[in-house]
Image (cartoon, grey):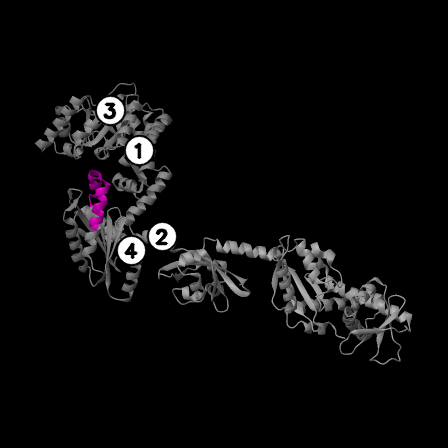
Amino acid sequence: MRGSHAIARDFGTDSSVRAILRQVDHRLRRWTQSDGACRRNGATQTGSKLRRARTAAAQDYFSFRHLPQDLRRGARLGRVKLGLKSRKATKRNRGVRVRTGRSPRKLRFARTQRALSGRDEVLRSRAEAEAAIADARKSHERLRQAVDILPQGIVFLDAEGRYVLWNKKYAEIYSKTADLFEEGARLEDTLRIGVARGDYPEAAGHEDEWIAERLRRLYQPGARHEQKLSDGRVILIDERLTDDGGVVGLRVDITELKQREASFRLLFDGNPVPMIVCALDDERILGVNDAAVAHYGYSRAEFERLTIRALQAFDSEPPWIADRSSEEQAGRTWKHVKADGALIDLAIYFRELTYAERPAVLLALMDITERKRAEARLAFMAQHDALTGLPNRTLLRQQMDEMLLHTRRSAEKVALLMLGLDNFKAVNDTLGHAVGDKLLRGVAKRLRSTLREEDALARLNSDEFAILQSGLTRPEDAVGLAKRLLEAIADPYLLDGHSVVIGASIGIAMAPGDGDESEKLLKSADMALSRAKQDARGSFAFFEAALDARAQSRRKIEVELRDAIQHDVLRPYYQPLIDLQSGRITGFEALVRWPHAERGMVSPAEFIPVAEDTGLINPLGRLMLRRACLDAATWPDDVRVAVNLSPLQFRSGNLLSMVTEALKASGLPPRRLELEITETLLLEKSAQVLATLHALRALGVRISMDDFGTGYSSLSYLRSFPFDKIKIDQSFVRDLGANREAQAIIRSIVSLGKGLGVTITAEGVETEAELSCLRAEGCDEGQGFLFSKARPNIEIVSLLVAQRGIDGGEAALVA
């Protein structure tokens, strides 16, 4: 008889069946190795008896299955008694005696067919027969227990399609027909009853054909097939023939797997994202969804004739080889070719799987063509000016770095020409920003047409451009280009019916002499441009080392001024305002002074422009206003204090609150505070400026116009706002003794003030002749070194005491 390994050979090379039988054999080994089981089975743990026990289990099964049906049922119920023939019998005639009733029968094994044939014979040893029956039943039970532990359903059928053995999992799978399972029962009968009861919905309407096909597959196995039960479960059936014509069948519940496949198919076919499945081995496309067909323009048949490499625009490894991690997948962009030849950018995500029983990979294809175009547009915008399309400062700096690197390796020079438009703001203010934008585009076009192909052009800010010229041998080589640029820009522009003429100034810096790094060269060219605008607009200027020294000095002033404001170092000094008729002090003008630890008293002419350029004028102005109000609060009640305001303080938007806070903190009445503004503030014609001036005057503060007569249209400003005082610029006062025109201007201003009811104050009075003339013309007040220089507050108190006397009597400061 054969052991379990011999049984395995009956089923060919099917891996699943071999695995099941190995589990059976393993289970038998465990039983025979268990002490308790060995005692129950009458076996020992010795090697020879262990092998006999395993072999006997397999032999018992094959012996038992060849018994006639009535004898097998009787043996299972314990009604059949078997025995062995006497030891004198030949091996050929060795058999089993069976008693099922009154008449015993002998069943003899044939050597070849191993079939039982019987005839009556007297059982010689009753005890041996009963022991044989018990051993047969135990062997059968051991085999049943062995297959019961397997996770798959197992069934053994004989050559006539009758049940021989099945495990619990098989009964669980076919739970609705499990009551029909009985040894010797025919599979065909159980199928018919199951079909009649509706256990197999796939047989509905063609029951006989379905049963015939099922039986045909039973005896011609080799291909797996699926079976659907009435409760919706799907069972995978795999069957193999044995040598004697029987069948061993495997049943696996694949319901969950089919559900996952259905979900995958639903997600795959209905997914709006193009998806492709291709084989891992030959990269051939195995399947595509509708979105892929629509997106690429290939039919399904055309897809299935292609490999994934055929879709790639450039020959490279497929994604699952090139990008293994999810980070690599997300960061890689692929180019594919559509059926019409169009190139598309893709982000490809993949996952390996089994498809149609082949190792495959699922590709999800995200078309990012538009995103890449948007990124390209953003990248262009990040390095180019949106209005003119020219490179911006960022790209210019990169181009400069490349050119400067070349100059270090050769004797060539690079010229950076920084071009600034003259009075461009006036064009914007008068003709509007739309015309200003067209003007900038026109300038950019003219500049580009003037340059060589290898020259670089960039727009730096609203009205400044930069030109980078390479291949020069000396600074004079840049002069020719500068002249051509100025001539090109000077021609009129016809914009929306307006003929616009605009000039430009150019600052030139040479590399490597004026800077061997991009930032330093830009800084040098900017300083040269400032000099060109200061000296003569419409011209060009080269950078000089002295310009850098001045720039460094301004930077040092800025740093030290910021520190001085923070530590409250700056102080107001006060210059008196004198009533020219009585000589009485009417007030003082607060002038800021900076006592420097190293440089002594720093002139306002040095640090006020720096403060305005750097935004420090706002904290400086707040500090001076607060200090002046505190000092003036200690003076007599009829003495006013005048404080200068910068136009930048009006733009900050908090001037009104700053004045209110200073008055409140000091307790100074608003009528004793006088704020001086210049004509340049009114050039802006800003509604915000006028609104602030009216609010200050409504508060009770006096407003005076400083440096009257130096602006473009001073008289028109007097109609814009009702000033309390007009201060004549000192340039007119200084010429009084020698210039009759200056005296006529003074006379006119005084007459204008009297007509408007405005106080007229002359600045810069330094001589008796000037004072005498001003008195003769009827000027109200005077201010200058003739009366007093600016003094600290501690001296102002002494000055007031000296003029008015300790007892309150007054004395004129001037006779």
Secondary structure state at the residue bearing disc 2:
helix
Q: Quadrant of residue 689?
A: top left
Task: Determine which residue is flagged by label 1.
Answer: 572
The CA span between labels 1 and 4 is 46 Å
Categorize mark 2 by other alpha carbons within 10 Å: few (<14), some (14-19), many (20+): few
Q: Which amino acid does label 2 sit on?
A: Ala
Q: Say whether marks 1 and 4 touch (CB < 8 Å).
A: no
Looking at the image, is 379 positioned above or below residue 13? above
Viewer can see residue 612: yes
Question: Which residues are drawn in magenta?
Answer: 422-443
Task: Determine which residue is flagged by label 4.
Answer: 396
- Nearer the N terminus, badge 4 or badge 3? 4
Q: Nearer the viewer, residue 195 or 279?
A: 195
Q: Which of marks 2 and 1 is in front?
A: 2
Going by the image, does 39 lie left or right of 661? right
Q: Which of 495 and 582 is in front in this view?
A: 495
Q: Quick check: is 720 in the magenta stretch?
A: no
Q: What residue type is labelled 1?
A: Pro
Give the number of the disc on residue 585: 3
